[in-house]
Image (cartoon, grey):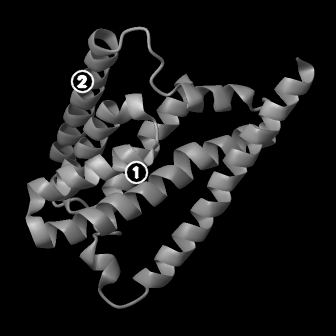
Amino acid sequence: EKAGKEASAVVALGGIWGLVVSGLITVGLLMLHLRKSGRKEAIGLFAPSQLSVVKTLGIALGLLAIAYALNWLYSTYVVPGVELQKDIKLMLAAVPRTPLNMVVLFLAAAVMAPLVEELLFRGYLQTSLKHHMGGTWAILVSALIFSLVHMQPLAIPGLFALGAAFGYIYDRTGSLKTNILLHLANNALAVAFM
C-alpha cells in the first residue's frame, strides 16, 4: 500500500509540475505573439473593464453564482452521488503536503491554469469566433471547447456553465485582465476547498 501511495504521489507531482512548466511555455509563446503592435489591445489584455467596478462585480458575481447553482442542480439531481471531478481530486489528494508542493500546486491550479485558459479561450478563441459568428455564438462555442478540453465528461455541463459565464463577462467588460483576475480567484477558492 505504501508503494502505491508513493507512486501516486510521483504521478501527481509530475502532473502538477507538468502543468506549471507547460503553462509557463504557453504563456511565454503567447506573450511573444502578443508583442506585435495592437494584439494586446485587440484582446483587452491590460484593458480595464468598460463597465464600472460595481457593474463589473455585480455581473461577475451574479453569473458565477448562477453557474455554480446550475452545477449544484446538475450534480444533485441529474448525477447524484457521482464525483464530477474525481480524477482531479484524487490527484490533489495524492500530493504530499510539503510547503514546496503546496506552492507548486497553487501555481499550477490557481495561477497558470486560469492565465492560460483565459488567454486561449477568451482572448484568442472567443475574440476570433466573434468576428465570424457574433458574440453569443462565440461565447457558447468557446465555452463548449473550454469544457471539453478539461477531459472530465461528467463535469462538462458545470464547466460549460462556468466557461459561458466567463465568456459573457469578457464580452461585456472587454477586459481580459478582469477575467484573468476573476478566474484566478475562482480557482484559488476551488483549490482551498479541495
Identify whether 23 is placed above or below 103.
below
Query: Taking the image as drawn, is residue 91 in sight?
Result: yes
Amino acid type for the residue under numbered disc 1: Leu
Amino acid type for the residue under numbered disc 2: Leu
Give the secondary structure at mark 1.
helix
Taking the image as shown, residue 121 lies to the left or right of residue 11, namely: left
Q: Residue furthest front?
A: 153
Q: Residue furthest bottom?
A: 37
Taking the image as shown, residue 57 lies to the left or right of residue 51, namely: right
Q: Residues within 10 Å of mark 1 (few under 14, many from 20)?
A: some
Disc nearer the start of the sequence (1/2): 2
Give the secondary structure at mark 2.
helix
Pick whichever, 107 or 126, lies toward us: 126
Where residue 141 appears, as percent x and y from the top left, is: 22, 54
Identify whether 127 is placed above or below 145.
below
Taking the image as shown, residue 118 lies to the left or right of residue 5, namely: left
Residue at point 70% right, 43% down?
Answer: 103
Pick whichever, 124 or 43, lies toward us: 124
- Residue underneath mark 2: 70
Query: Quarter of the image holding residue 44?
Result: bottom left
Residue at point 87% right, 30% down?
Answer: 6
- Residue underneath mark 1: 181
Q: Quadrant of the C terminus?
A: top right
Give the number of the mark in front: 1 or 2.
2
Where residue 1 appears, as percent x and y from the top left, is: 88, 17
Where residue 71 appears, as percent x and y from the top left, is: 30, 24
Residue at point 30% right, 45% down?
Answer: 163
